[in-house]
Image: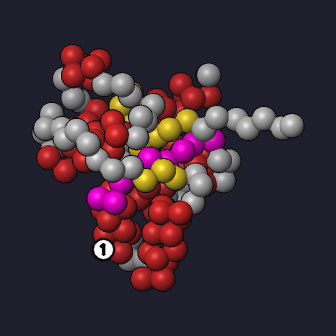
Amino acid sequence: MVSRKRRTAVVLDTNVLVGALKSRFQGGPNQRVLRLWLERRRLQLIVSDELIAEYLDVFSDVLGLKDSTCAAWRERFERDGRTSVVQLGRRFAESRDSDDNLLLAVAHAGNAEWLITNDKDLLELPEQFQRSLPFTVARPSEFLKAFEDS
C-alpha cells in the first residue's frame, strides 16, 4: 500500500493569489506557493465561505477574470480535495486592518500551520500575540524556506 504524504495546512492571503496570478516571473515566491498547492499537491488550502467570496470579488474586480473563470475557481475552492472549507469560530480583532482578521479566524478554525501573506498589518502583529497563535504568519519567501528545509 502506498502511503500518502501529509499536506501542510495553509491559509493564503488574497494578495498571495493575486501576486501569483499577475506575475510573469515563474520563479517568484507567490507563484511557487500557488504551485505547491495546485500542481504539487503539497498544501491543503484552508478557506471559509467568507474568504472564498473575498477571493472571487478580487479575481473579478482586480484581475478582471470572466464570470466563467471565477465559477471554475469557486468550484475548486469549494469541492477540490486540496481545499478544506471551514466554519468560522473565534473572531479576532488584533490586526490594524479589520479585513485581515478574517484570515486569522480562518487559520484558527482550520487548524492551519501557516498563514501566508504579503500584508504588513498581519506580518507586524504584536509579537506576544503572534506567539499565542497556533500557526505561523509569514511572507511567501519565509514559508518556502521553512517548508523546503523541513
- Residue at the (18%, 38%) spot, across then down: 92
Q: Quadrant of residue 24?
A: bottom right
Q: In this view of the protein, which residue sits in the foreground, 30 or 57?
A: 57
**Label 1: element kind:** helix
- Residue at the (13%, 38%) spot, across then down: 93
Q: Is residue 51 visible?
A: yes
Label 1: how many Cα within 10 Å (few below 14, some 14–19, many 20+): few
Q: Quadrant of residue 97?
A: top left
Residue 110 in percent (x, y) is at 40, 40
Image position of 102 with respect to 144: above or below: below
Residue 14 in percent (x, y) is at 36, 54
Q: Quadrant of residue 148?
A: top right
Q: Amino acid at mark 1?
A: Asp
Q: In this view of the protein, which residue sits in the foreground, 149 or 92?
A: 92
Name the side, left or right, on which 97 lies relative to 106. Answer: left
Q: In this view of the protein, which residue sits in the foreground, 8 or 16?
A: 8
Highlighted magenta segment, given as a residue range: 42-50
Indicate yes or no whether the magenta region holds residue 67: no
Name the side, left or right, on which 2 lies relative to 84. Answer: right
Image position of 74 with respect to 39: above or below: below
Image quarter hosting the N terminus: top right
Image quarter hosting the C terminus: top right
Residue 75 in percent (x, y) is at 51, 69
Look at mark 1 in the image and give the residue it sits on.
Answer: 61
